[in-house]
Image (spheres, rainbow, N blue to C red):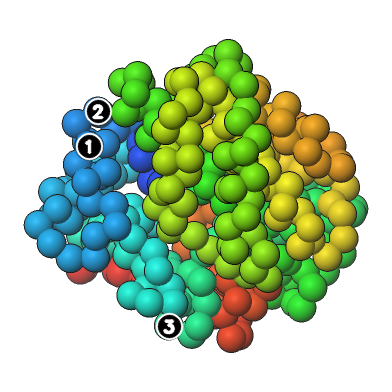
Amino acid sequence: MDKVRQKGAVIRALGAMSGTSLDGVDAAVIETDGVTIKGFGPAEYLSYSAEQRGVLHAALGHWHGDVLAPATDVVMDAHRQLLGQFAEVDLIGFHGQTVAHAPRAQGTLQLGDGAALAEAFGVPVVWDFRSADVELGGEGAPLAPFFHFACAKWFGADAPVAFLNLGGVGNITWVDPGFDRPEEDGALLAFDTGPANAPINDLVQARLGVPYDAGGAIAAKGTVETGALELFLAEPYFARIPPKSLDRNDFAEMVGLVAELSDADATATLTAMCAAGVAEAMQHCPRAPSRVLVTGGGRHNPVLMRMLAVSLDCPVMPVEDVGLDGDMLEAQAFAYLAVRVARGLPTSCPGTTGVRAAVSGGTLSVPAP
């Protein structure tokens, strides 16, 4: 524990992320002092079964009730299984599973018990990353931007860049690498762009019994319904000034807009909605980024990537083009944030979540001796 708190010491941290796409759990190791990235370690993925996804899906949008206990069991069992594959780590960053997010109302809810994981593995665990930010007036999301800032420094960006994460919900981080610290005014702007993979996944699961549109194959056969797309873009969310964030189900009516379309046309239209939300988001950037680096599952969808390339006025590429791992960037982010929390460094600021002042958000649980 002394090493974890020792300023400047390089920590081998393990981060775990279970996203709103409900596909599974990512876990990855990084080496960092909480400021700069010193190295990347091993990474693993554990897929949820169809039954487990069903249990988690049933818990979405619930703040209380009987559906939360079995969903928590799914989250904890998966994390115990996956994290147990890693050895010789100093600290764990455990995000948990978001099932409800309404920062201006009830707050934010991630299922999982970091204290129990600390006891199970005998390693300090940082968890409940979002609550402190929400309590201080922030959106509680997105939280990866401070790590994106460190990544831009790591690969030597010399002009503003944007990280676009396409998970269940899309979010963007605009980074100016000319600043020294992420919490400085003007260094970062981050917010949710709109729905991404979640409505596509839900639609193809309900209609075709498959968990996602693999390789964009379904969307590639369809035609975008422009009327539905225009109704989608009329949503007031897109005109709101960031920072701003979304719950997974905030745009649930999207599926209704494509209800009368064929499977292919509906999937193509939902995919176009994701890209259009990103194009709208770019209007809020302080100035145009030199490139957009795409992370998350959406970058594996060539139809979506083509739509983004057509919609945006700058190069669009997967984060692998700068040496990063787009499948594990979120898990790595929570490893990095865990070290910052353990050392009292901020993890969010007004430019990333709208919080009143830079805050170090997270609970550190230490196993009993």
Q: Earlier in the sequence, mark 3 or mark 1?
A: 1
Please tell me whether residue 221 is drawn above or below residue 148 in the rendered image. Answer: above
Report helix, strand or loop for mark 1. helix
Where the C terminus falls, by quadrant?
bottom left
Q: Earlier in the sequence, mark 2 or mark 3?
A: 2
Q: Which residue is mark 1?
A: 54
Q: How many marks?
A: 3
CA separation in Å, label 2 and label 3: 35 Å
Amino acid type at circle 1 is Gly
Q: Tell me the CA gap for discs 1 and 2.
A: 6 Å
- What amino acid is found at the position of numbered circle 2 in the picture? Ala
Q: Residues within 10 Å of mark 3 (few under 14, many from 20)?
A: some
Looking at the image, residue 13 sits to the left or right of residue 80; the answer is right
Foreground mark, 3 or 1, reads: 1
Which residue is at 78% across, 38% downward? 311
Residue 305's quadrant in the figure?
top right
Residue at the spot x=9%, y=57% of the render? 66
Dot 3 falls on a residue whose secondary structure is: helix
Q: Are marks 3 and 1 in contact (CB under 8 Å)?
A: no
Q: 224 or 39: which is nearer to us?
A: 224
C-alpha distance separating marks 3 and 1: 31 Å
Q: For mark 3, what is the residue?
A: 135
Would you name the residue on which mark 2 appears? 50
Tell me the quadrant of the picture where the N terminus can be found. bottom left
Q: Nearer the viewer, residue 326 or 87?
A: 326
